[in-house]
Image (cartoon, grey):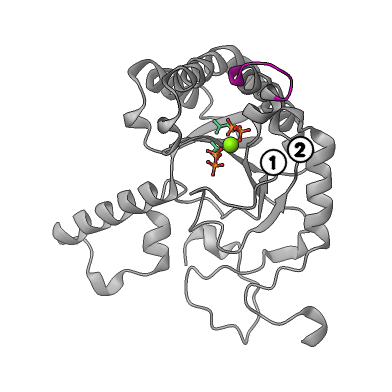
Amino acid sequence: MSETNSRYTNGSPAAQVPAGTPQAPAGGRSGPRHVAIIMDGNGRWATERGLPRVAGHRAGIEAIRRVVKACPELGIEILTLYAFSTENWKRPRDEVNALMNLLVEYCRKEVDELDRNGVRIQVLGRVAELPELQRREVERAVERTRHNRRLILNLALNYGSHAELVDAFKAILARVLAGELDPSQIDEQTIAAHLYTAGMPDPDLVIRTGGEYRLSNFLLWQAAYAELWVTPVYWPEFDRCHLEQALAEYARRERRFGGVPARGR
Ligand code: IPE
Ligand code: IPE
Ligand code: MG
């Protein structure tokens, strides 16, 4: 069992659970370690105010600032933000350009403060396909903050679960063809170890703002047993209070991972 998954072993002597199977975190922890957010509703927020959609994306950066600040204070160790999907390229060129410019601006303006606050930036997605400038700025921010330990901030950029699985399967196949891996050894851990999130615990809680009840190609493998929380609040209005509401709801949920309810044990 990998180091990551061993943290999830509940130690029950009866449990003969296959490696990689999601289980309850040890130690009766009530808060999520890893929160992932589908930051949706920027465009609608702006349109309802008679503003261009890009004004919503800009306002969304303020929300990112608030949430990143709140996370370590609320005991969250990993925050994953869905910032740009592999499907978002189909938006009008002006909007895609505006989002790419905001990404550079975010990296340049925020990195000092993120670094001071102990935030380690990582990227999930096909970073190599980002335009050169964006790729360079993102890699610089990752490099600059790599020693930090207070919060891991995963930016999902040019991210899609289907693309991630394709990349993982290709990497696994390459290892098989190189004679490093026997196909009979491939298990759930092998797949997890080839995802962009390799070595990280799965998200415990997935939040979606903007009111839609869908995952939009986000962390399909990793969120297999995540608790879901949807709010109609548009992302630019999301603040610490909303995050606290989500955490309070999470604490009331009983995660069973396929087992039986506590009262039925
Ligand atoms: C989310 O807000 C930000 C990105 C997808 C980059 P949207 O731009 O999707 O906002 P709505 O859903 O159109 O309101
Ligand atoms: C999901 O939002 C992607 C991000 C938040 C980056 P979308 O607005 O792209 O999702 P759909 O199109 O409503 O499913
Ligand atoms: Mg949207």
Q: Considering the image in quadrants, where does the C terminus appear?
A: bottom right
**Percent from the top left, x then y, of residue 197?**
47, 48
**Percent from the top left, x then y, of residue 252?**
83, 62
Which residue has dot 2 on it? Answer: 233
| Quadrant of the rendered image containing residue 90 | top left
> Which residue is painted at 63% across and 18% down in the image?
58
Magenta segment: 48-54
Q: As rendered, which of 107 and 13 lies closer to the eye? A: 107
Q: As rendered, which of 76 and 47 lies closer to the eye? A: 47
Q: As rendered, which of 42 and 122 lies closer to the eye? A: 42
The reply to whether the residue tagged 1 has its Cβ within 8 angstroms of ligand 1 is no
Q: Is residue 117 visible?
A: no
Residue at disc 1, secondary structure: loop
Closer to the N terminus: mark 2 or mark 1? Answer: 1
**Main SS, magenta residues:** loop
Numbered circle sitting on residue 209:
1
> Which residue is painted at 26% across and 75% down in the image?
184
Q: Disc 2 vs disc 1: Cβ atoms closer than 8 Å?
A: yes
